[in-house]
Image (cartoon, grey):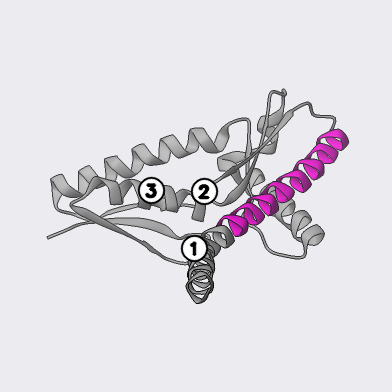
């Protein structure tokens, strides 16, 4: 009988050990789902806010919600006159994004990193800025001289820094104060 009790205790401790090993993985998975649920909620709040705004402005547009790279992404596409919500060099879009973030923060009680795109402007701009970063990196390598780019928003600078980092043989840094902060690309070596 003592062998049976010892065997049961051994089996129970093995089960407990197995569940202890899977508990952190389950907790991480649960936290990931909770985080994604929060981002989806932020996107829904932003979508509702933008839908009301479009109605007030009498603009047409389809609102698409997504989660990418740990942030809610809201896109407004398909309507005429949406370029007015982008403005010159995206200045109206930046302001609209900040207003949308504030509306989400007011509803949720926490800051967010929501990204707003209107009429595909950000995705097109991302491509242009990646090209600019690669070109500046190549120019810095070829001439051996630093390349100073025009002032950019934080969104724009991040894309250029990423493109420069991918190019290799150069490094980049931001210099100056907002709103005149710019990327400088330096040759390495």
The answer to which image quadrant residue 90 occupies is top right
How far from the left and from the top, in percent, is residue 130? Answer: 38, 40
What is the spatial separation of the Cα atoms under label 1 and label 3, in whole angstroms?
47 Å
Tell me the chief SS of the magenta region.
Answer: helix
> In the current view of this chain or complex, which residue is farthest to the bottom?
2
Q: Mark 1 or mark 3, which has the lower sequence index?
A: 1
Left or right, residue 134 beside residue 123:
left
How many neighbours does mark 1 have within 10 angstroms: few (below 14), some (14-19), or many (20 or more)?
few
Label ID, residue 37: none
The quadrant the C terminus occupies is: bottom left
Magenta region: 29-57
Per the image, label 1 sits on a secondary structure element best described as helix
**Residue 55 painted magenta:** yes
Left or right, residue 85 beside residue 70:
right
How far from the left and from the top, in percent, is residue 110? Answer: 72, 65
For mark 3, what is the residue?
160
Residue 151 visible: no
Query: For this rendering, which residue is in front, 133 or 146?
Result: 133
Q: Residue at x 36, y 50 (%)?
A: 162
Label ID, residue 18: 1
How many neighbours does mark 2 have within 10 angstroms: few (below 14), some (14-19), or many (20 or more)?
few
For mark 2, what is the residue?
69
What is the spatial separation of the Cα atoms under label 3 and label 2, in whole angstroms?
18 Å
What is the spatial separation of the Cα atoms under label 2 and label 1, in whole angstroms?
32 Å
Q: Residue at x 28, y 45 (%)?
A: 136
How far from the left and from the top, in percent, is residue 156? Answer: 47, 48
Q: Mark 3 or mark 2, which has the lower sequence index?
A: 2
The answer to whether 5 is drawn above or below residue 57 in the figure is below
Q: Residue at x 81, y 58 (%)?
A: 107
Q: Residue at x 81, y 42 (%)?
A: 48
């Amino acid at each position: 009988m003592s062998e049976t009790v010892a065997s049961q205790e051994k089996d129970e401790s093995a089960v407990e050990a197995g569940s202890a090993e899977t508990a952190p993985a389950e907790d991480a998975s649960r936290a990931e789902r909770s985080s994604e649920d929060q981002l989806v909620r932020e996107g829904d709040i932003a979508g509702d806010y933008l839908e009301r705004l479009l109605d007030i402005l009498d603009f047409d547009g389809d609102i698409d919600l997504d989660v990418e790279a740990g942030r809610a992404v809201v896109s407004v596409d398909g309507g005429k006159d949406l370029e007015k919500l982008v403005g010159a060099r995206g200045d109206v879009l930046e302001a609209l994004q900040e207003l949308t973030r504030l509306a989400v923060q007011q509803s949720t009680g926490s800051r967010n990193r929501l990204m707003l795109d209107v009429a595909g402007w950000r995705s097109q701009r991302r491509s242009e800025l990646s090209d600019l970063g690669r070109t500046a990196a190549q120019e810095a390598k070829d001439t051996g001289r630093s390349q100073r780019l025009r002032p950019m928003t934080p969104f724009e600078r991040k894309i250029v820094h990423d493109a420069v980092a991918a190019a290799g043989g150069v490094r980049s840094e931001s210099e100056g104060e907002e709103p005149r902060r710019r990327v400088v690309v330096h040759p390495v070596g």
